[in-house]
Image (cartoon, rainbow, N blue to C red):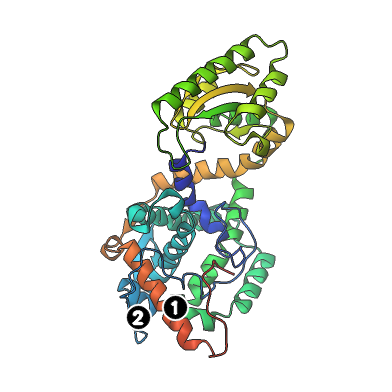
Amino acid sequence: MKNWKRLLALLLSGAMALSLFACGSGGANPSGEPGASGSPDPAASAEPSPSATPAIVADLSQGALEFSAGVQPGDVLLTVNGAEIPADLFLYLLGMNCVNMQSYLPYFGMTLADVADTMLDETVSLAAYHALLRQKAGELGCPPTDAQNGEIDKSMEEADLETTAAYWQLSNDSARYIMSMNAYYNNVLEAATQEPSEEELNAYLAEQKVYRVKHILLKTVDDSRQPLADDVVAEKRAQAEDLLAQLQTAVDLPAKFDELMMAHSEDNPQNNPDGYLAKSGDMVAPFEEASLALEEGGLSDIVESEFGYHIILRLPLTDEDKAQYREEYRPGVLENLVSQWQKEAEVVRSKALDGIDVADFYNRLSAYQAALAEKLAPAESAPVESGGVG
């Protein structure tokens, strides 16, 4: 049911980097939730992507960035209102975006080459996002506190950068920049936003077009999204019409809907008996449009989407739903502010940046890191495993 294009965009969003140093060995947290600082993992992209060619032979006499992208760590790839973003910082962000996306692209039947331009643009947006947070922290008078700097210092000491530097050619300055991202984010969030009043929260819910629904789905495609036979589709339509007729004459619509949903829906209702909480853009267009057109408690006609036939019941938002969006309100306000700052910012890309082939960069970096790990690992140690930042 989820809109895969929106999901892909979210996975590539700038918020992703807020947790680059805040996750376990399984990879960076794609939700983008801010977390505690950690350290870069030299094995973060040690496993080549599925599209990598085995013909890549790493030249360890070169640095990781020279081999993978033809640049030096201090080369300026981007400026944001005059603030310079060096290659080691930018390519770390790009590389970690690649690590994240490698976990999801097979689900969409895609490779890094398919989303290369988007990934490069989103990493530019990501780098600009964090540069602007620093600039605004200066304007608002909320740089990292002594306590936050102490935590960053501790993380730097624990990061073992002498070991990891060769894998990314990441300088101490750039590592500290990344490790302080959460501090700048949290400080600007606190300084630039405030808790919403009930009126502001309701306005936010309306603006985001938040809704809760249940639905009965009768699929017209198989698990690989190939159309079912015409006679099967006709049977599904007839079944949908019968279910709708039962619902339209039900004395207790909510109870009858639950009964028929559990018995007939092909969207695993047992796993989601309370339905969907969604906002604009989350669901495929016909489903969303029909849901938003209903009043609370309203029943749709038969709605056809790329998945099949739906019958939708709109539900009121619960207190828990509203509490969830209350938590999202301030980050949402900050995202809107940053979007405006980005529109107003002067962002200049270098020729070297626009010449980067994302898939080739990641494949070469993967090959380099794997070769370096093999060279440095003791003979008796276990093989290096791919993962996120530690």
What amino acid type should be assigned to the residue bearing mark 1? Answer: Ala
* Badge 1 element: helix
Q: Residue furthest front?
A: 231
Q: Could you say where residue 147 lies in the image, as x and y percent from the top left?
A: 69, 66
Q: Could you say where residue 364 lies in the image, as x and y percent from the top left?
A: 35, 72
- Image: 241 above or below 79: above
The residue sitting at 28% across, 60% down in the picture is 354
What amino acid type should be assigned to the residue bearing mark 2? Answer: Ala
Task: Choose between 253 and 329: the one closer to the eye.
Answer: 253
Task: Choose between 12 and 152: the one closer to the eye.
Answer: 12
- Image: 329 above or below 125: above
Task: Choose between 179 and 370: the one closer to the eye.
Answer: 370
Q: Is residue 233 left or right of residue 163?
A: left
Query: Is residue 347 visible in this depiction of the protein?
Result: no
> What label does residue 194 carry, if any?
none
Chain-order first, disc 2 or disc 1: 2
Mark 2, other Cα within 10 Å: few <14 / some 14–19 / many ≥20 = some
Residue 387 sits in quarter: bottom right
> What label does residue 370 carry, if any?
1
- Separation of marks 2 and 1 at Cα, in angstroms: 9 Å
Mark 1, other Cα within 10 Å: few <14 / some 14–19 / many ≥20 = many
Contact (CB < 8 A) between labels 2 and 1? yes
Q: Could you say where residue 200 lies in the image, as x and y percent from the top left?
A: 63, 30
The residue sitting at 67% across, 69% down in the picture is 151
Q: Is residue 45 left or right of residue 205?
A: left
> What label does residue 58 carry, if any?
2
* Badge 2 element: loop
